[in-house]
Image (tube, grey):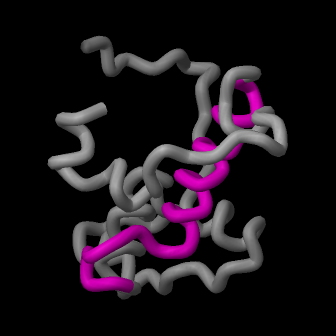
Amino acid sequence: MNTTRSPCATFSAGEAVARQLGVTPLTGNEVGLRVIGWTGETPLWYYVLREAAVTTSGERLGPVGGRIVAEVIVTLLNRDPASVRFAGPEWEPRRSFIELLQPSARSRS
């Protein structure tokens, strides 16, 4: 796996994304990077992890991480002409989304 980034590639800070989404950003203490001398805004990947830990005790994503994942899923569905988003009114699901997430349902698919 190549983890080298182009010098032109930039990623938004977690706090900037939170502000853009209208979410109150985590404090410096909540992020926890100040203890190691970090003074800038938090890299998005780390912010999403800390947000989950702070807001839900790590049980699920927080507001920023959840929004990012939701927007990716909706975008993928919108770009796939065979997705359920383009199904006609006669379409009916065979199983619920919850059933599809259960291990026994995945083995039957």
Instruction: Classify the position of the N terminus by image quarter.
Output: top left
What is the magenta range?
56-80
Q: Nearer the viewer, residue 29 or 76?
A: 76
Residue in the foreground of this view, choosing between 108 and 27: 108
Left or right relative to 30: residue 73:
right
The reply, left or right, for residue 101 in relation to residue 75 is left
Residue 71 lies left or right of residue 50; in this view the side is right
Which image quarter: residue 73? top right
Quarter of the image with the C terminus in it:
top left
Q: Is residue 34 visible?
A: no
- Location of residue 42 in the rendering, given as x and y in whole percent from the top left corner: 47, 61
Q: Is residue 8 visible?
A: yes
The image shows residue 76 at horizontal and vertical percentages of 64, 33
Dominant secondary structure (helix, strand or loop) of the stretch shown in magenta: helix
Q: Residue at x 38, y 61 (%)?
A: 98
Write the residue at 18% across / 35% down. Answer: 107
Question: Residue drawn at (29%, 77%), measured in percent from left and top?
Answer: 53
Q: Residue at x 64, y 70 (%)?
A: 18
